[in-house]
Image (cartoon, rainbow, N blue to C red):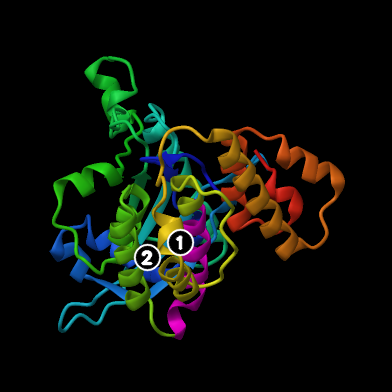
């Protein structure tokens, strides 16, 4: 499902954003070495399932997985190899000490699932577990399994589980600077962290220009839904923002009412009015997608806390049913 939390004070990115190959490509462009990045055929990226059934029939879920072809070297007649990228979206407010173990479990289940579905064959492709962290505090957890396992005799060390993940810490990337201006992942990081309305408006305009073309249609809609939630969270507005479907519509709405957007962009106070606006927006979005809203659902949303509204709003972005909106 859709993990929840804040980067700065805005909602985190949802699964749908990174189910688009352009977003994964640009995220990896920000983090991988140029040699490794250029050795991969991003045009042939394949999204693969991340819902796994273990041997004990216990259902488990990862986040997002991609198979990326490795480019052949000149004169190489062997079958093309692959790199399996497991993208784990980690949006909690603190680092997770068990993350090396989680990545090891997801990796093993992913290999099993891909083998059974005949997406891969032996020998197994190398894997790159990537943890995308959007929390407000620095990530403190150990990057590998060695940091989780107690001291032991040297004779036991060869038998211990080994796993290490690549940490992508959004806040650290932004603070380091140097991210490309039109990189989609970098634009989303900046929009999530921006507290200045004029900067936010310029970033949305850049994002519109960077997502032109039919191949970006689905990503455009997912970005719009996420940014609308960010805007509603950041702006203490007198009225909820109207639903929009595309980045172009969002940019136009900002341009047509600059004074409304400029007022109290994430200022203190007015919490009660802000919660009412968030609840009203969520109810209108739910009605637009799922039809008439039962009275008990309306009452539940209107009486919700800020954290509940944020959770349900983020769930809404990729919820296939009304019940999934309120899934914890």
Mark 1 or mark 2, which has the lower sequence index? 1
Seen from the viewer's position, the closer of residues 328 and 202 is 202
Identify the disc placed on residue 17. 1
User: Residue 281 location in percent, x, y?
Assistant: 63, 53
Within 10 Å of disc 2 (Cα), the crowding (few <14, some 14-19, many 20+) is some
Residue 308 image-quadrant placement: top right
Query: Decide: marks 1, 2 in contact (CB < 8 A)?
Result: yes
Badge 1 density bin: few <14, some 14–19, many ≥20, Cα 10 Å = many
Determine the secondary structure under disc 1: helix
> In the rendering, at what x and y percent does residue 172 appear?
22, 42
User: In the image, which disc is placed on residue 279?
Assistant: none
Residue beneath label 2, please?
A: 23
Residue 66 lies in magenta, yes or no? no
Percent from the top left, x then y, of residue 101? 41, 33
Picture layout, residue 41 above or below residue 58: below
Would you say residue 97 is visible in this rendering? yes
Task: Tell me if 55 is positioned left or right of 301 in this view.
Answer: left
Q: Residue furthest right?
A: 295
The residue located at (52%, 35%) in the rendering is 270
- Can residue 1 be seen from the camera position used here? no
- Check the image and report above or below for 261 versus 160: below
> Magenta part mainly helix, strand or loop?
helix
Give the distance between the C-alpha atoms of the residues marked 1 and 2, in whole angstroms. 7 Å
Provide the residue span drawn in magenta.
214-229
């Amino acid at each position: 499902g859709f993990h929840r939390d804040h980067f700065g004070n805005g909602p985190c990115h949802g699964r749908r954003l990174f189910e688009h190959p352009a977003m994964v490509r640009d995220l990896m462009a920000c983090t991988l070495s140029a040699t490794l990045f250029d050795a991969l055929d991003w045009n042939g990226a394949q999204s693969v399932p991340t819902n796994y059934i273990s041997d004990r029939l216990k259902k488990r879920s990862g986040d997002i997985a991609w198979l990326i072809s490795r480019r052949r070297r000149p004169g190489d007649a062997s079958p093309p190899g692959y790199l399996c990228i497991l993208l784990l979206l980690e949006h909690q407010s603190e680092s997770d000490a068990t993350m090396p173990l989680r990545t090891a479990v997801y990796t093993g289940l992913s290999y099993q699932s891909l083998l059974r579905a005949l997406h891969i064959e032996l020998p197994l492709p190398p894997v790159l577990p990537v943890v995308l962290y959007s929390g407000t505090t620095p990530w403190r957890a150990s990057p590998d399994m060695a940091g989780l396992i107690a001291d032991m005799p040297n004779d036991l060390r060869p038998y211990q589980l080994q796993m290490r993940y690549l940490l992508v810490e959004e806040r650290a990337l932004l603070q380091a600077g140097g991210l490309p201006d039109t990189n989609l992942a970098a634009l989303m990081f900046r929009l999530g962290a921006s507290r200045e309305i004029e900067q936010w408006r310029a970033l949305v305009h850049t994002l519109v220009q960077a997502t032109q073309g039919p191949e970006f249609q689905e990503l455009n809609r997912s970005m719009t839904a996420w940014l609308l939630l960010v805007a509603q969270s950041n702006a203490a507005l007198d009225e909820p923002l109207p639903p929009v479907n595309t980045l172009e519509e969002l940019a136009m709405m900002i341009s047509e009412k600059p004074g409304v957007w400029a007022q109290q962009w994430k200022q203190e106070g007015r919490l009660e009015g802000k919660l009412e606006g968030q609840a009203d927006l969520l109810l209108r979005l739910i009605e637009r997608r799922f039809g008439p809203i039962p009275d008990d659902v309306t009452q539940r949303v209107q009486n919700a806390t800020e954290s509940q509204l944020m959770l349900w709003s983020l769930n809404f972005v990729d919820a296939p049913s009304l019940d999934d909106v309120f899934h914890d």
